[in-house]
Image (cartoon, grey):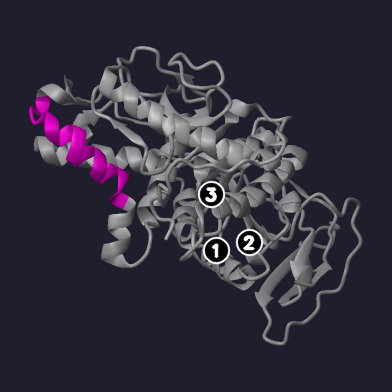
Amino acid sequence: MAMTKLNLNPTKTHLHSSQFSFLPRTLPRHLHCAFAPFHSTTKHARISCSVAPNQVQVPAVQTQDPKTKPECYGVFCLTYDLKAEEETRSWKKIINIAVSGAAGMISNHLLFKLASGEVFGPDQPIALKLLGSERSIQALEGVAMELEDSLFPLLREVSIGIDPYEVFQDAEWALLIGAKPRGPGMERAALLDINGQIFAEQGKALNAVASRNVKVIVVGNPCNTNALICLKNAPNIPARNFHALTRLDENRAKCQLALKAGVFYDKVSNVTIWGNHSTTQVPDFLNAKIDGLPAKDAIKDHKWLEEEFTQTVQKRGGALIQKWGRSSAASTAVSIVDAIRSLVTPTPEGDWFCTGVYTNGNPYGIAEDIVFSMPCRSKGDGDYELVKDVIFDDYLRQRIAKTEAELLAEKKCVAHLTGEGIAVCDLPVDTMLPGEM
C-alpha cells in the first residue's frame, strides 16, 4: 500500500508524572487531513482526519525524527495537550499493546475489551498498535474507525500498519493472533512451516524494536511451536516472557467439570491443561478442585473423567465448528483477556492458572527447550512462577508423555526456523488442532 509521510514536531502531554507523546509518522493516502494551530502563540498543529473518497494525497511536513512512530489513524492522529481534568488525575503511564491479525474475528472482540479498560483497569490508558497485511489493510482501517467512534477515554492512540518493525515499536504487550488457517488437504507439517515463518519474522521484529521486557502471547496455531519459534528469533527478550494461549482449553475444562458436578463454574479451581494446544492436550482432573474438594471426590464417575471429560475438552473446538460453521472467536478473545489478567493481577491464594511457557528449569521432568502448558501463579507483576505443589499418577504422566512427544516432533519439524539445523518432520500422528479447519 502506498504511503505518504506526514510528520510533525512532537508535542508532549503532561498528566501528572506520566508523559504521553503523540507523534504521527505517516498516514494512508486516502486519509484527508486539515491542519489548524491550537492558538497563535504556539507552533503545535492540530490535525483533523477523515476518509476521503477521492484518496487525496496528504502533503509531507518535515519532522525531526521520521522513524519514531508508525502511521496513526483518524482522531488518534491529533497532536494535542491533554488537560489534567479530574477524571484523569489517577491515570497511569500509557501501555503500548501490539496486536497482529488485528482485522480478524478474534481481534474484533478483543480490541474493544482492551480499549474499555476491562483488561488493564479503569485508570490505565493504552495505545493500540495494529498489525495487518496488504490484503487486510482496508478492513484494518475499518477497525480503527470503529475504535475511533466508540469514544473510549482510555484509548489514547491507535496506529495501524503492515510492517511489524514499525508496529511493534516499544510494544510492552504483543498479542500475536494472525496466522494462516489450515485448509483442506494441507499437511500439518506444511502448516507448521507456513505459520512458523510468520512467527520467525515477528520474533525478529520484537527483538529489534519492542520493549526489552515485552510480554508475548501467541494465539495463532500451532501456538506452542509458534511461540517457540518466536522466542528463538528474539534472543534479547527473556524466553519466559513468551506464552502460548491454552487458557481457552482451561476455561472449557472448568465448564465441563462444573456441569458434571452441578455447580456454577466459579466453584471450580486449580485446573491445568498440560502440553500442546492440540488433541493430545491433557486436561488435569487429578489436581482440579470443585468447591474446595478434589474433583475426583466431587465427581465419583472416574470413567467419565478419564474418557468423556478429556475427549470433550480436547475436541471442543472441532465440535463448535461443526455446530456454527466457524471457529471460536468471542470465547478465544475472552480467554486472551483472562490470560493477561492472570499475569497482571495476583493469583488467588491456593489457586493457579495455566499457560504455555518455556520449559527450561521446570520441576516436573518435562523435556526442556519446548513451550508446554503448565500450572502457574503470578504476583500480578506480569511475571509468573511454576506451581510446585502438584501431584501426579500413572494416568497423568502417560498422557503428559504423549503430548510432550508431539511437541518434540514439532520442534524437529521447524528446526530450520529456530536456528537448529535442517528440519526433520516425522510427526507421530496428525492431531488436528482445535479450530484449524
Circle 2 sits on which residue? 132
Q: Nearer the viewer, mark 1 or mark 3?
A: 1
Asked if residue 4 is positioned above or below residue 295 in the image, the reply reads below
Kindly report the distance in space between the C-alpha atoms of the residues bearing marks 1 and 3.
21 Å
Q: Is residue 108 left or right of residue 45?
A: left
| Quadrant location, the N terminus | bottom right
Q: Tell me the element at label 1.
A: loop
- Whether residue 308 appears in magenta in the rendering, the answer is yes
Where does residue 392 sit, x and y in percent of width and height? 30, 17
Circle 3 sits on which residue? 154
> Residue at 17% of width from left, 33% of height from top?
305
Q: Nearer the viewer, residue 430 or 91?
A: 430
Contact between labelled residues 3 and 2, with CB atoms less than 8 Å apart: no
Q: Tell me the element at label 3.
A: loop
Type of secondary structure dominating the magenta stretch = helix
Q: Nearer the viewer, residue 421 or 392?
A: 421
Which span is picked out in magenta?
A: 298-316
> Residue at 77% of width from left, 82% of height from top?
56
Residue flagged by tag 3: what amino acid is it? Answer: Leu
Contact between labelled residues 1 and 2, with CB atoms less than 8 Å apart: yes
Residue flagged by tag 2: what amino acid is it? Answer: Gly
Q: Is residue 430 left or right of residue 20?
A: left
> Residue at 81% of width from left, 58% of height from top?
44
Asked if residue 87 is positioned above or below residue 8 in the image, the reply reads above
Circle 1 sits on which residue? 103
Q: Is residue 100 left or right of residue 297?
A: right
Rendered image quadrant of residue 413: top right
> Residue at 29% of width from left, 50% of height from top?
316
Of mark 2 and mark 3, the one earlier in the sequence is 2
